[in-house]
Amino acid sequence: MRPQFPLGRAQELPFWRRPVTLLFLMAAAMPVAFATWSALLNNFVIEVAGFNGSDIGWLHTVREIPGFLAIGVIALIMFMHEQVLALVSLLLLGVATAITAHFPSLGGILAITMLSSIGFHYFETVNQSLQLQWLDKLRAPQMLGWLMAGGSAATLVAYVLIVLTWQAFDLSYNFVYMVSGGFTAVIAVFCLMAYPRFEAPNPQLKKMVLRRRYWLYYALQFMAGARRQIFIVFAGFMMVEKFGFEVHEVTALFLINLVVNMIFAPLMGKAVFHFGERRALMFEYAGLAIVFLAYGGIYFFGWGVVLAATLYVIDHILFSLALALKTYFQKIADPGDIAPTAAVAFTINHIAAVFLPAALGYLWLVSPAAVFFGAAGMAGISFGLALLIPRHPEPGNETIFARFLPAPAE
C-alpha cells in the first residue's frame, strides 16, 4: 500500500488510479469469487456432500456468523486503514473460494465457508463505508447503480465461461473455484500495490455508534437481512432440489440476472435520485411481497419452472433498489459516523441471518411454501417501515415523526 493521499487531490492522479476507479475494481473483483461460489454451491453440496434442506440451512447460518460479527471492523480500523482492511478481506475471500472444493464434506465445507465469509462480510462492511465517504451525495445514487452494473458485467464474463465450458470441457468444481477465487485474489493484491491510501476529509469515529435518530435505518436493515436470507438460501436451492437444475442451468439463470442488473441497476440509481428513497423502497418491498407469495404458490398450486425462473429474475431487479437504503443513511448521517455505523448496520442486518437459515431449514423439510410465505410477511413489515421515511431525509429529519420531536441529546 502506497503512502496516504488526500481525497480532495484525487483529480491530480491518472484516471486509473483515482478512488472511483478503485471502487469499480473492487466492485468487479468481489462478485467474481462470491457469485461463482454461489452459482456452483447448491449443485456442489448436493452432488458431492449429499446435503439436504437442513444441511444447507446450517451452512448459511455459519456463513452469516461473520456478518453478525461485522462490528469487529470498528476494532480493526483502530490500527488498520479502512482501504487496507477492505483489500485484505477481498484477498481472503479470493483464497478461500479458490480452495473450496478441497473440502468436500459437511465439516470441511462449513470451515472454508466461515473463512470466505469473514472475507466477504468484512469487505462489504468497509466497502460500503468507503463508497459513502468517497462519493458525493448528489451523485451517489447514480454512481452506486453504476458500481452494481460494473460488478454484474465482470461476473457476466465468468458465468458465460461456465455456461459455455462446463459440459463442453467437463470442468470440475475445483477448477472453476480455483480460477474464480484466484482472479479475485490477484485483483486484491494489485490494488494493494498500485493505489495510494486515500484519506477522506472527515475522520471516522473508531468506536461503536448507536444513535436514536438512526432507529429507522437500523429497523430497515434488520428486516432486509431477515428477508434476504430466505431468498439467498432457499430460492436457488429450490431450483436444484425441485426442478433438477444442473450447474450450467443454474449458471445460465444467474447469467440472465447479471444482464438484467447491468441494464436496470443504473436505471434504479436514477429512479432513486428522481423519486427519492421513500418511494423507491416502498416499490421494492411491495414487489418482493408479491414475488415471495408467488414462490409459495409454486409449492401450493404446483406452478412450473418457467414461473420460478421468472420470479428469480424479478427479485434481482427489485434488489437493485436496495441502494436507496444506503443513500438514505448517507443523507441523515453525521460524516464521521459512516464507518462505525456501517459496521453496526451490518451486524444488525445479520442478527436474523444467524438463526433463520438453520431454523427455516427444518421448516423447509415440512413445508417449503411456508418459508416463502413468511418472507412475504417480512416484506410487508418492511413496506410499513418505508412509509416512515420523509421525502427529503437529512440530519434532524430522519423520519416523518422527527419534526414533531425534540432533538435527542446524544
Image (spheres, grey):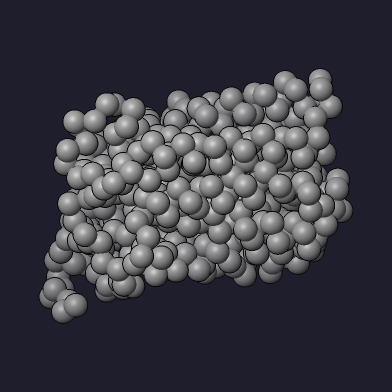
Residue at 48%, 51% in the rendered image: 88
* Side of 262 where 176 appears, left or right: right
* Side of 290 where 84 appears, left or right: left
Report the front residue among 222 and 290: 222
Q: Quadrant of residue 320?
A: top left
Residue at 86%, 45% in the rendered image: 47
Report the front residue among 330 and 122: 122
Residue at 44%, 61% in the rendered image: 346
Q: Is residue 223 visible?
A: no
Q: Determine whether 197 is above or below 211 in the image.
A: above
Give the image location of residue 164, x and y in percent.
72, 21
Give the image location of residue 51, x and y in percent.
82, 55
Label total for image: 0
Give the image location of residue 209, x and y in percent.
30, 71
Q: Is residue 241 visible?
A: yes
* Side of 313 where 59 appears, left or right: right
Q: Quadrant of residue 208?
A: bottom left
* Side of 400 where 237 appears, left or right: right
Q: Determine whether 308 is above or below 201 in the image.
A: above
Q: Determine whether 232 is above or below 268 in the image.
A: below
Q: Quadrant of the C terminus?
A: bottom left
Q: Quadrant of residue 195?
A: top left
Give the image location of residue 205, x and y in percent.
26, 66
Q: Determine whether 27 is above or below 400 in the image.
A: above
Residue at 70%, 61% in the rendered image: 111
Report the front residue among 67 and 198: 198
